[in-house]
Image (spheres, rainbow, N blue to C red):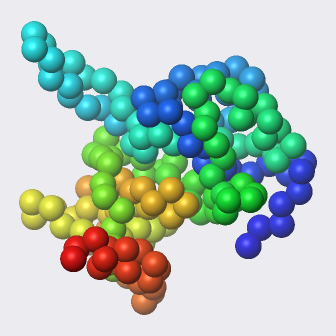
Amino acid sequence: MFLLTLNMRHWFVLHVRIRSELLVSSVLEQKGFECFTPTFQQSRIYTDRVKNVQTALFPGYVFCHFALHDSRQILITPAVKTILGDGRDPIPLQEQEISNLRCASSSETARPEEYPGIGQRVRVRQGLFTGVEGFLMSRKGRDRLIVSVDLIGSSFSIELDSWQLEPAGFTRMPSRVSLRATASSR
């Protein structure tokens, strides 16, 4: 796991008010923190028009790079509810998860997805997203790579061709997720 020190910067997940993700990112960046809020284009239908808007891939969450001694500055920011953790201490994201997010969320085909219950873990072996790991699914005859953030139980997918993918070992989804999926299907 991580050895957390007060002065060492890590990526943390902030739970924020829904539809405030971009505002929170902007405010925190003005305070000098690095934030990352992946978005996608979504069409919203109104009674008199259709409008394309930027929407957060992970509604209610912002990724922020800061040291633990800055936690108070983060938490007093309007619309920030909490820093995700184990109930006592914030838990930083692994660098690989942030790398996956940055790379894969840059795709124009990125869309929110339900957190996968059971599936094969794959790695992109060729192309723009080389090295990104996730779970394979198929929708409308097209392969999609589901990229997940375990700490918030959220995912998004990007469209890829099967020739770009290879198995990432025999790793399966954590059993707690499988149990949750099994319990909810009853």
- For this orientation, the residue located farthest to the front is 186
- How many marks the image carries: the answer is 0
Q: Foreground: 176 or 156?
A: 176
- Position of the C terminus, as image quadrant, is bottom left
Task: Name, please, the residue furthest toward the bottom.
Answer: 170
Going by the image, does 161 lie left or right of 56? left
Residue placed at 83% from the left, 66% from the top? Answer: 3
In this view, 128 is above or below 64: below
Looking at the image, residue 92 lies above or below residue 33: below
Q: Is residue 162 visible?
A: no
Q: Position of residue 119 (x, y in %)?
A: 31, 78
x 36%, y 53%: residue: 156
Q: Residue at horizontal 45%, vertical 60%?
A: 153
Which residue does the image show at 30% across and 24% down from the upper left? Answer: 53
Instruction: Give the x, y percent position of residue 151.
Output: 55, 61
**Quarter of the picture holding the N terminus:** bottom right
- In the displayed structure, 30 sits above or below 10; it is above
Residue 160 occupies which quadrant of the picture? bottom left
- In the image, is 116 to the left or to the right of 2? left
Q: Quadrant of residue 138?
A: bottom left
Horizontally, is 23 left or right of 173 in the view?
Answer: right
Residue 72 lies, in percent from the top left, at: 80, 36
Q: Residue 172: percent from the left, percent from the top?
A: 41, 83
* Side of 171 where 140 appears, left or right: left
Residue 89 falls in which quadrant of the image? bottom right
The reply to whether residue 25 is in sight is yes
